[in-house]
Amino acid sequence: MAAPKPDISHRLAHLRSLMEERNVDVYIVPSEDSHSSEYIADCDARREFISGFTGSAGWAIVTRNAAALATDGRYFNQACHELDDNWKLLKQGLQDVPTWQEWAAEQSSGGKVVAVDPELITGLVAKKLSDQIRKAGGAELLPLAENLIDIIWAHDRPPRPCRTVTVLPDEFTGKSVRSKVTELRHELAKKNCPGFFISMLDEVAWLFNLRGSDITYNPVFFSYAIVTPQTVVLYVDESRLSVSAKSYLSDNDVQTKPYETFLPDAQRIASEMLEKSLSSEGLAPETFLMSNKGSWALRRALGGDGTVDETRSPIGDAKAIKNEVEIRGMRECHVRDGAALIEFFAWLEDQLVAKKATLDEVQAATKLEDLRSKHRHFVGLSFSTISSSGPK
């Protein structure tokens, strides 16, 4: 039986009531989580909760009397089907259709306040949007620390995943944590940077050779990290770490701290560095490094303009350059996957030709996953199977 459709009108009414209490005229609900993840855990599906739209990309903008959902061409048909009459669909990329930023800025004219959770929007996007709001005659882009969707969703919001975090051995990574950190520190030294603040989940997992399963089809876990010339700190719920993971981190001189202390620590470190520069005559304030995908909340914690370099992540670049062990592993996994596909094609031919069976796409996809799962080193699929069949 299909799940009952949510009462979007009731949710929007509740949201507008909260907006009015806080003197907010326009509220923005991004798709991403605090780590700028495109694919998110169920507990972070805030845009889906308020709009009913289940696609992976889009922005919801709610005013006191209107609501708009912006998404790209992959999801136009889906959005038309899933959105109710409360929503205006902004088909991004089409001629004469405003971007979500333009539409939000237009709604702010006349001195209205636009608000967003600063952990869910990047610093660069926030800066651009702030400029657009000012040009449109809006009051400001307000970083609202309390997430209004979370308040509405309090009674049945799924809990944040807390699954075990394990080590991906060096035999698969080809490089130890210590080696990766040394290379990262070399990049920081070239920029004369006192610290790199890491918020992307895949970058944390890669740097520390750890894997999790907090997000479906993504081997990541909720975490942050800070690397300085002297220390390496991983922000994660330590109870989630396997015994081998704790030992591995300790052997590589990695400290662990609670996940929720990342932003306070970032703010503290930035304040200490600023005080140091002010107390030393002629010493210019140091500039911290964060990814251009880092949140506006992190940018604000580090001091904003003048103290933050929002740039292409050196970890992202290093992660993209595969070493010999990784290249060999990729080749070997394709051999194993090719064998599974051959087994699948043989099974499918037998079912359709010899046995004259009738199969649907789900049955075929399930069989293929079963065959793949029997091969060495299988952990899970990288994405939900997208299957189809053509005419005879």
Image: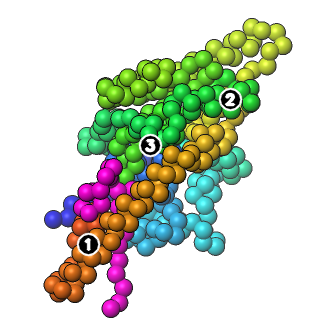
- Magenta residues, start to end: 370-392
Label 1 vs 2, first from the N-terminus: 2
Label 2 vs 3, first from the N-terminus: 3
Q: Secondary structure at mark 1?
A: helix
Task: Return the x and y of residue 127 as percentages of the image width and height.
Answer: 66, 43
Q: Amino acid at mark 2?
A: His
Where residue 114 sits, quadrant-wise, is top right
Q: Amino acid at mark 3?
A: Phe
Q: How is the image coloured?
A: rainbow
Q: Secondary structure at mark 2?
A: helix
Q: Are marks 1 and 2 in contact (CB under 8 Å)?
A: no
**Residue 364 marker:** 1
Q: Secondary structure at mark 3?
A: helix
Where residue 56 sits, quadrant-wise, is bottom left
Q: Which residue is mark 3?
A: 172
**Would you say residue 243 sits in the magenta stretch?**
no
**Residue 186 marker:** 2
Task: Return the x and y of residue 281 as percentages of the image width and height.
Answer: 82, 9
